[in-house]
Amino acid sequence: MPTQFGTIASGSSGNCAYAGLGGEHFLIDAGVSGKKIAMGIARFSVPRLSGILVTHEHTDHVRGLGVVARRFRVPVYATPLTWRYFTRHGTIGPMPEELVRYVEPNQAFAVGGVKITAFDISHDASQPVGYTLEASGEKIAVATDLGQATETVKNNLRGARILYIESNHDIEMVKNGRYHAALKARVLSARGHLSNAAAGVLLSEVCGGLAVGKRPYVLLAHLSEENNRPMLAYDTVLRVLDGHDVQVRQLAVAERDAPGEMIVLGD
């Protein structure tokens, strides 16, 4: 099967993405309703789910997780401290033991022929991670909900043909916006969210100097409804890329409330 990637929802109100490669099919997070996820799966013609990869426990990433996992009998992959949070707080409801999978940050594991790595990110959650998925020489990288781009993040993003990257907010919109001081400080902190400008710098560092055939598709993700706009995110990131003389195969903004267009490598 081809390597493909699409979003079911992406934003501060809910996040869920689909990745298919190496004959396996995954959701990354399940932060919208089970009904909406089922509709997205149907739209993308996903024959079955091999697993759900959880980045962290915040509601906008796990709202429909329990429902979907139980309904479709799908294994759920999450870090030990994320699972501890689920257990203590009952966030996702009862989970059959046979569907529970623990993943250790920065240690690769395999699902069928797909190599998956959960890598450390900086965010105010129990044990948050991004993911890379690799099969048949192709790589997808997912990094949202991170306050800063660490060397670990950069190293994991390098070489990906599809990059799903947070571009959460415009810094001036946060500073001048309606959020109270504590929430502004959280968003702008090193354990908060990545700004448009920071996303552009991150992409410039990991995509610079690539040959035309190696340039990635880039999807800007997890935009704040309050402190961002799709065209503002796009224009800011593109301006930073142009300033560093860096080009990508395609730059787009993930849809907030509807499934986006499928990216298929080889098209």
Image: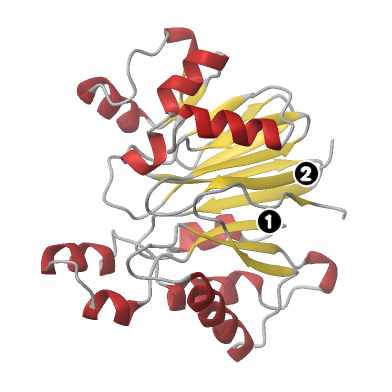
Percent position of residue 254, x then y: 57, 58
- Kindly identify the residue that appears in the image at 53 percent across and 19 percent down: 75
**Is residue 160 at least partly visible in the picture?**
no
Q: Nearer the viewer, residue 66 or 96?
A: 66
Percent position of residue 144, x then y: 45, 54
Numbered label attached to residue 162: 1
Residue 19, placed above or below residue 174: above
Q: Earlier in the sequence, mark 2 or mark 1?
A: 2
Q: CA distance from mark 2 to mark 1?
A: 9 Å
Q: Nearer the viewer, residue 137 or 61?
A: 61
Task: Inspect the image, locate mark 2, and give the three-letter code of the amino acid beneath it.
Answer: Thr
Task: Inspect the image, locate mark 1, and give the three-letter code of the amino acid beneath it.
Answer: Ile
Q: Residue furthest left?
A: 181
Helix, strand or loop status at disc 1: strand
Percent position of residue 150, x then y: 42, 63
Check the picture and name the quadrant holding the N terminus: top right
**Is residue 213 at least partly visible in the picture?**
yes
Numbered label attached to residue 3: 2
Residue 223: which quarter of the image? bottom left
